[in-house]
Image (cartoon, rainbow, N blue to C red):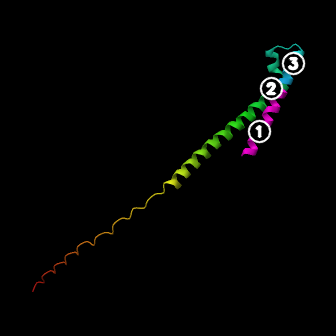
Amino acid sequence: MANRRAVYERHLTSFKNALSLRSNALKAKKLDEKAQQKDPTFRNIKGKIRQFERRLRAIDKVQAVNAEVEARRAERLANPKVKVKKPKAVAAPAAKPKKEKKSAG
């Protein structure tokens, strides 16, 4: 996961650099901010930036969950459950024998 994060961060930096270069090029053409926002290349680069930022946020969420799981696992290993032995059930008193019916006769 760390390798993927490093790759995404590298891509994000390169797209941010490309965005600043494109913005400077559009300013050199004397386009205002509103016109820059409509430029297809500018929009494409901004979309790529959003995409990689979203991916990095997803990685952060996964890492947070993994850290929580590791903390719980370490806690569980540090404090193992003690099995409580239940006392064996005492034998119930024997049932009374049934009375036999008197036969007529």
Q: Secondary structure at mark 1?
A: helix
Q: Crowding near pointer 3: few (<14 within 10 Å), some, many (20+)? A: some
In the image, residue 25 above or below residue 9? above
Q: Disc 3 marks which residue? A: 26
Q: Check whether the beta carbons of the residues at disc 2 and disc 1 lie within 8 A of each other.
A: no
Residue name at image x 25 percent, y 71 percent: 92
* Residue bearing mark 2: 43
- SS for callout 2: helix
**Quick one: label 3 or label 1, which is nearer the N terminus?**
1
CA distance for labels 2 and 1: 19 Å
Kindly report which numbered mark, 3 or 2, lies closer to the viewer in this rendering. Answer: 3
| Amino acid bearing label 3 | Leu
Can you name the residue that lies furthest to the front here? 78
Does 18 sit above or below residue 9?
Answer: above
Labelled disc at residue 8: 1
Upstream in sequence: badge 2 or badge 1: 1
Answer with left or right where residue 46 lies relative to residue 100. Answer: right
Amino acid type of the residue tagged 2 in the rendering: Arg
User: Mark 3 vs mark 2: which is more N-terminal?
Assistant: 3
Viewer-nearest of labels 3 and 1? 1
- Classed neighbour count for the residue bearing mark 1: other residues with Cα under 10 Å, few (<14), some (14–19), many (≥20): some
The CA distance from mark 3 to mark 1 is: 27 Å
Q: CA distance from mark 3 to mark 2?
A: 12 Å
Is 11 inside the magenta-drawn segment?
yes
Can you tell which quarter of the image residue 95 is in?
bottom left
Which region of the structure is painted magenta? 1-19
Q: Nearer the viewer, residue 21 or 54?
A: 21
Q: Is residue 42 shown above or below 88? A: above
